[in-house]
Amino acid sequence: MQGKKIIVGISGGIAAYKSAEMVRLLVKEGCSVQAVMTASAMSFVAPLTFSTLTGRPVYHDLFAERQASTVHIDLARWPDLVIVAPATANFIAKVAHGLADDLLSTVLLAVRLEECPIILAPAMNTAMFHNWAVKENLALLRRRGYILADPASGELACGEVGEGRMLEPEQLLALIVRTFGPGDYAGETVLVTAGPTREALDPVRYLSNHSSGRMGYALARAASQRGARVILISGPTSLEPPPDVEFYPVTTAREMFALALKFFPDVDIVIKAAAVADYRPELQAEQKIKKGEALELKLVRNPDILEELGKRKEKQFLVGFAAETAELLTHAREKMERKNLDLVVANDVTREGAGFNTETNIVQLLYRDGGVEEFPLMSKLELAHQLLDRIKVCRRG
Ligand code: CTP
């Protein structure tokens, strides 16, 4: 997505607030975004919101004095993709019938559809969405090659529940990514594990660790954006699973183990970002444990999931993580050998900007041939893409 030029058109619906988040995600992906608003959109969200997020002035006036009279043509020639979100019933009708009475509708008329995909994300009340005029306008646009982000069912701003709710920003982002092409991971199946596991002591207490799941979720999102089928097995986190991934929430190490074994024969790549609890209480009390003078816990070993996958490995490429607080490379190298891994992502979790609960990470990659590559501090999503780049090179051999 880096460097892609995208016009985001906003027409006048309450879902305009969601477009702000979509724009933020696009900018985070490295896209250049130009917002174009209708007059009614500006009644819902101020242009300042979009100009701040995009770093560019918002266009909304066809005849503004301080801009070229051909601004609609200049804008129409610029993007690699146009998305209108939300697209109201009125705006959809204008596009379907070639009306051009404001800047956004005029830009849409001037974009060459065969060179630049146009996505419309309808958002309206259910009755309006099922109105024949709207249905036929949408069908007409679909036939002409516009891409429609079919709205979801759900609670609407008017209080009704039904179809007409604009897709969520993450889902729109996923659609935009897909529109640009199949991606370099098309045809691959990637299994990602993420987050901590929890091992119960009694019905109210458990043993766990500080893993937030962010690195694993970023990897799942990145692989999915690049066209892979992604299976995400995750321990408990506060994160939303990325769209378009097959999501399996689990609690304990043994649940994660069972699912990982089940999917293993069908996957091409395993990325084990989860921080799996190595031990669990030998006994799990059925009732809440009452306090006494002291409590002795006996812990027993959990299965080492990655080690087991390493033993069963055939075609699969195995990536492990090694989160350490000392002697990083020595421990990471030992894990690579013991677990039969192809690549190890090692990080010293005591460093600022690395490890648990941060948006960023600082890692070193250990290759099978003994090579070590150091990465500077970067966002977990950026790091996820870099790791996928390296995995591709390693697998090519
Ligand atoms: N791992 C696993 N199953 C476990 C423990 C770890 O699959 N029971 C995986 C992790 O997902 C990670 C890698 O093994 O990809 C290394 O995990 P880590 O906790 O750093 O290492 P351990 O093997 O548990 O060794 P130690 O705790 O002694 O550092």
Image (cartoon, grey):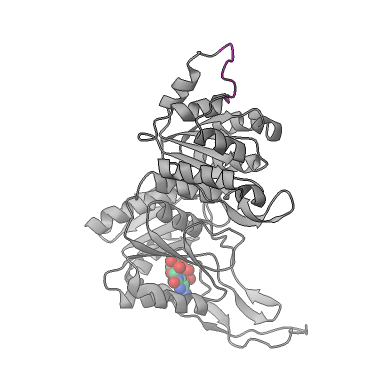
Q: In the picture, which quadrant includes the C terminus?
A: bottom left
Is residue 60 found inside the magenta-colored segment of the image? Answer: yes
Q: What residue is shown at x 51% (from left), y 56% (from top)?
A: 242
Location of residue 116 in the rendering, given as x and y in whole percent from the top left corner: 39, 35
Q: Is residue 345 magenta?
A: no
**What residue range appears in magenta?**
57-66
Question: Overall secondary structure of the magenta stretch?
Answer: loop
What percent of the width, then of the height, locates residue 135? 55, 47
339 or 69, which lies in front? 69
Instruction: Please tell me whether residue 151 is drawn above or below residue 271 in the rendered image.
Output: above
Task: Say if 97 sits above or below 154 in the image.
Answer: above
Q: Residue at x 43, y 59 (%)?
A: 328
Q: Residue at x 42, y 51 (%)?
A: 225
Q: List x then y, in percent, for residue 4.
A: 41, 36
Image side of residue 43 versus residue 116, left or right: right
Ligand 1: which quarter? bottom left
In the rendered image, which quarter contains the N terminus? top left
- Residue projecting furthest to the front: 132
Residue 353 visible in the picture: no
Location of residue 237 in the rendering, given as x and y in whole percent from the top left corner? 59, 63
Of residues 304 and 1, which is closer to you in this image? 1
Q: Is residue 54 above or below residue 263?
A: above
Q: Total number of numbered labels?
A: 0
Identify which residue, 353 or 220, lies in the foreground.
220
* Residue 194 visible in the displayed image: yes
Depth check: give the residue in front, 146 or 235.
146
Q: Residue furthest top?
A: 65
